[in-house]
Every structure is written in structure tokens, then in C-alpha cells.
Image (tube, grey):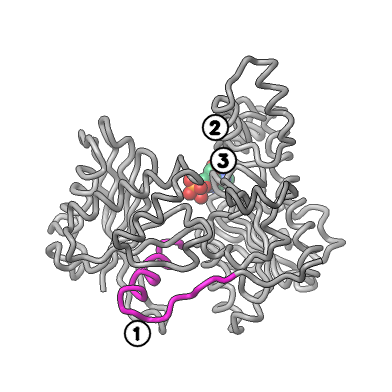
Amino acid sequence: MNILVLNSGSSSIKFQVVKTDQDLIARDGDRCLAKGQVERIGSLALVHFQATGRPPLKEDAPLRDYRCALDRIVRWVISPESGIEGIKSMADIHIIGHRVVHGGEKFRSSTVINAEVLEGIEDCIELAPLHNPANIRGIRAAAEVFGRGVPQVAVFDTSFHATMPETAYLYGIPYHLYRRYKIRRYGFHGTSHRYLAYRYRVLKNIPKEKVDIITLHLGNGCSACAIKGGGSVNTSMGFTPLEGMVMGTRAGDVDVSVIEYLAHKEGLSLPDMITMLNKQSGLLGLSGLTSDMRELLEEEKDNGDRRATLAIDVFCASARRRIGSYLAEMGGADALVFSGGIGENSPAIRKRICAGLEALGIELDAARNTALKGGQTGEVSTKASRVKILVIPTNEELLIARDAFRAVAGLPQPTFSPRKTRRT
Ligand code: ADP
């Protein structure tokens, strides 16, 4: 089966074509046939497509909306120019899998999209006003381009975290506000954390119930996840992706009183404040230079920029604090897993995050850490390290493709249900 995996953002669509089926899943042999993205939809869009093992195609194209962008993607995918093995017409694309950011409390597993499910995703717009509308545009564009004959499946960023106990997902605010408005921690990046847990289990050849690890997804957005018995028991992002660790442009945890104080001092509206915390904070806000970690590391090295160092140090401290708190919460863990653009590619950041964690049983092996190349999977802890340190490149698209296949084939899906906690 060929699955088109779509990740629709505010002005972009990222995609992968993944070949998977029951046999390939069992052998862990499913693979990406092609991937790419269209950015700046609505103006002169940037197109970047690449079939596995072939040279990339890069061009500018005037693509006015999602439908046009998806049309462009599909025309390339089925063209002889892309040369994708086994795909010659639209009939060779069997299922569309969508990354959907917010599934609220309703969606605890990946779901075939019908009118009712689409309505459910629309109901979650008020929880994710920046993300779900784009995901819905992607779903509608796919329905227009492919028609009703091709099933579409929604895979939610939130569902892996549905196993969190109340003690992790409730905020210390009046309980009726949770009941009335569903204000709680949902967590995001769930498909990435779930993939890391899966890959760890395969690497270690252990059953799911034995997976007790802390995963760090460090990209432009960053989140940590405490995984016990194979399921999420806590995660750093909250009601929205703004909470938690310091990120590229997001502030992470901030005393909410700052919002009122600053709004007053700077004459900013509430939406302005939220934009500032989402888009002008984090590494960008602290350094005053860039949200890009690689550029900050270069600034620090080449020019000794003090604010670049400060931003990197605050970032690493916020990650370290999260690791410590999850170790306490989980009563220890077997491994710490780094992933995402920063976690996979930067030995320097892994080293700075792990510095000082030796007393907690986390010991990085300097030589193994620097020797591991970007994109590789490997262990970078010392032999004596009680908590192993691994680097695992994430692959959300693979899980989206697998879920999409299973949902359409009517095979059992991983479902994530909340753990019971005792009423005290
Ligand atoms: P997204 O969250 O948008 O998917 P990525 O996971 O690709 O983003 O992560 C992007 C981040 O990874 C950027 O801050 C980028 O600078 C950082 N990054 C990528 N390669 C390196 C590297 N070699 N060293 C340090 N940081 C890197």
C-alpha cells in the first residue's frame, strides 16, 4: 500500500510517500519512497521534492491555495519525472494520512475521517486555533484532489499523551474550569515520542511494558516526555505547545502574571502578548539573533557572542531541569533519548544538557557522542552509565503511515486511555 502522509501547516504542506502493509510492518521493512514540501502557499511558493535516491527538484511556483499545492505534489508524485517505483497514476496512492495537531479528549487513537470525525476536529479548533484549521484545509484539499474513493486518516499529536494520569494533566486551577472548558495539559509531538518509544523497544528487543525512558524531541519546537510501561505519563507541552521547555521562538514556562504586568507596561493586547511568547521568545528572544540553534552555536564559536551563549545555556538548563523532574516522577528511567533536529545533530548540545547529571546516573561518553553522525542511531553513554543515553532520529511519518494503513484495513490500532489515579 502507498500512503501519502500530509503535514499541513499555516502556509506549508510537508509530505512523504510511504510504502507499508502488514507484512512490511511485521518486518519493520516499510520505507519512504519520496518526500518534500511546499512552503509559502498563497504567494510564490517554494517547492522542494525528492524521491529516495534521486536528485531533488527545487522550483518556485505560483500556488494560490492548499488545493493547488496538493495538486502540484500529486502531479509530481505520479509523474515519470519523480520516478517513484510502483506509482504511475493517482490510483497507486491508496490512503492519505494526516498529522492533526489537536484531538482534544475525544480522539485517543488514529481515526478514519468521515463527516463526524471532521466535525470533531473542527470542535478542537478553539483548543488549537493556530494548527487545526491548517490541518482541516489539508483534509479538504485532499478530498477535492482525490475524491471520496481514497480514504483519509487523522493521526493526532495529542493521542499518545492520553495515558497521562490526572496528576500529570491537571493544572492547579479550580477543577470546574477543567470540567467546563477542558483546560488541562494535552501535550503534543505525541507521534514523535511514540516513535522513539517504539524504536527503543525494537533496538533493545524488549516488550512495550518494559519501556521506561525519557524522550527529548528538540527541534524548532521542543518537548520532553516521561514514558513508563511504554506509555506517556507526563510531557512538557501543555494546553498548547507554548508550555514547557525553552524552544526556538517559544518561551516555555513563564509565570503567567508576567502577561498582565507586561501588557500594562508595554501597552500590548492579550493576543500580542501570546504572539510575543510564541514567536519572539525562546532562543530568538534571549539571543536577539536567531531561533536557529546551529547559527547560535556558530555565533558563539566564531564571535564569542555572550547572548548566544546565554540563550544556549538557558535552553540546556530548561531541558536538564525537565530530565531531573521526570526521573523523580518516574522513580528512575532506563534511558534518555535525544531526537529532533538539535537532538539528532548536535553533540555539543547533548553534552551541555547532560553536564552535571552524573549524580543521577546519566554519564555521556564524550568520544561516542562526538563520533555519532547526524541521522545515525546510537548509544552515546559510558558503559557505567546507569541511565543509557541514545540518539534516535524521529520518524513521525512512518507511524502516521502505519496507523493510516491499520485504520483503513480495520486492524487493531494502538489506543491510549488515561491511567486511573486514586482520589485523595
Ligand atoms: P522542526 O521542529 O521544525 O521539525 P527540526 O527538527 O528540523 O525542526 O530542528 C530544527 C533545529 O535543529 C534548528 O534549530 C537547527 O538549527 C537545529 N539543527 C539542525 N542541525 C543542527 C546541527 N548540526 N547542530 C545544531 N543544531 C542543528
Q: Earlier in the sequence, mark 2 or mark 3?
A: 2
Q: Is-magenta flag for residue 413?
A: yes
Circle number at residue 279: 2
Q: How crowded is mark 2: few (under 14 residues within 10 Å), some or many (20 or more)?
A: some
| Disc 3 residue type (three-letter) | Arg
Stretch in magenta? 395-417
The reply to whether residue 52 is in sight is no
User: Element at badge 1?
Assistant: helix
**From this viewpoint, which residue is outermost toward the right?**
359
Q: Is mark 3 within 8 Å of ligand 1?
A: yes
Please say if the residues under marks 1 and 2 sit with CB atoms less than 8 Å apart: no
Circle number at residue 23: 1
Of tags 2 and 3, the one toward the viewer is 2
Circle number at residue 175: none
Of tags 3 and 1, the one toward the viewer is 1
In this orientation, which residue lies closer to the viewer: 209 or 25?
Answer: 209
* Residue 388 x/y as whole percent: 71, 69
| Disc 2 residue type (three-letter) | Lys
From the image, give the main secondary structure of the stretch colored magenta. helix
Q: Locate the C terminus and report the quarter of the image it occupies.
A: bottom right
Q: Which residue is drawn at 69% across and 61% down?
A: 367
Please say if the residues under marks 3 and 1 sit with CB atoms less than 8 Å apart: no
Q: Is-magenta flag for residue 219?
A: no
The reply to whether residue 89 is in sight is yes
Circle number at residue 294: 3
User: Element at badge 2?
Assistant: helix
Q: How crowded is mark 3: few (under 14 residues within 10 Å), some or many (20 or more)?
A: some
* Residue 116 x/y as whole percent: 34, 60
